[in-house]
Amino acid sequence: MAVIELQTQIAAPIERCFTLSLSVDVHTLSTAHTGEKVVGGVRTGVMQLGEHVTWRARHFGIWQELTSKITEYQYPTYFCDEMQKGAFKSMRHEHHFSIQGDHTLMTDLFEFESPLGVLGKLANTLVLYTYMRNLLTQRNAVIKSIAEGEQWKNLPGIR
């Protein structure tokens, strides 16, 4: 199993950072380069415990679908989404939030396991780890930009 840990400092309240991280609309903005679209579940706004979303996106030139569900939720410090269906053997993404002075520290723990045994482990090492880390880094940059600016005021479900 591969594990990616990222930390992002955001000059915005913890509640805003938490809510933006659960926003389907923010996720769509952060993955525009993959053509990612919602094809099932929650289609807009902020996800809640027990809700799911199905995404369709192009990765490595192949259209794929992935269904993710919010399985744990402790406002405003933690939530977890887990793959219910998709290309990975398993995927778990923990989102942790803490106050650091006048900033919010957003910490991602992203665990994934590829199918295909040894071939999957090789793919993790050669390609997927870096690819997924870059996707998460870009997602976090979008969350940071929206949280620190004014754009969050125009998004559904964000206060």
Image (tube, rainbow, N blue to C red):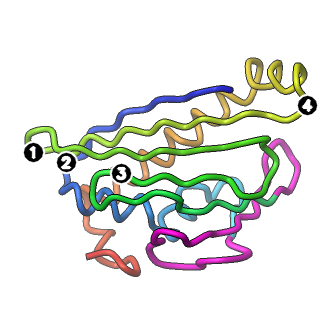
Per the rendered image, the range of residues in magenta is 38-64
Left/right of residue 11 with respect to residue 95 in the rendered view: left
Q: Amino acid at mark 2?
A: Ala
**The stretch drawn in magenta includes residue 102:** no
User: Distance from label 2 to label 1 (Cα)?
Assistant: 7 Å
Determine which of the numbered discs, if any, sits on residue 39 in the image: none
Query: Quick check: marks 2 and 1 in contact, CB under 8 Å?
Result: yes
Determine which of the numbered discs, if any, sits on residue 78 in the image: 3
User: Distance from label 2 to label 4 (Cα)?
Assistant: 42 Å
Q: Which of the 4 image quarters holds residue 14? A: bottom left
Query: Quick check: marks 1 and 4 in contact, CB under 8 Å?
Result: no
Q: Amino acid at mark 1?
A: Asp
Left/right of residue 118 with respect to residue 8 in the rendered view: right
Q: Please determine whether, in this image, residue 138 is positioned above or below residue 70.
A: above
- First-in-chain label (4 vs 3): 3
Determine which of the numbered discs, if any, sits on residue 102 in the image: 1
User: Distance from label 1 to label 3 (Cα)?
Assistant: 19 Å
Query: Which residue is labeled 4 in the image?
Result: 116
Determine which of the numbered discs, if any, sits on residue 11 in the image: 2
Quarter of the picture holding the N terminus = top right
User: Distance from label 1 to label 4 (Cα)?
Assistant: 45 Å
- First-in-chain label (2 vs 4): 2
User: Distance from label 3 to label 2 (Cα)?
Assistant: 18 Å
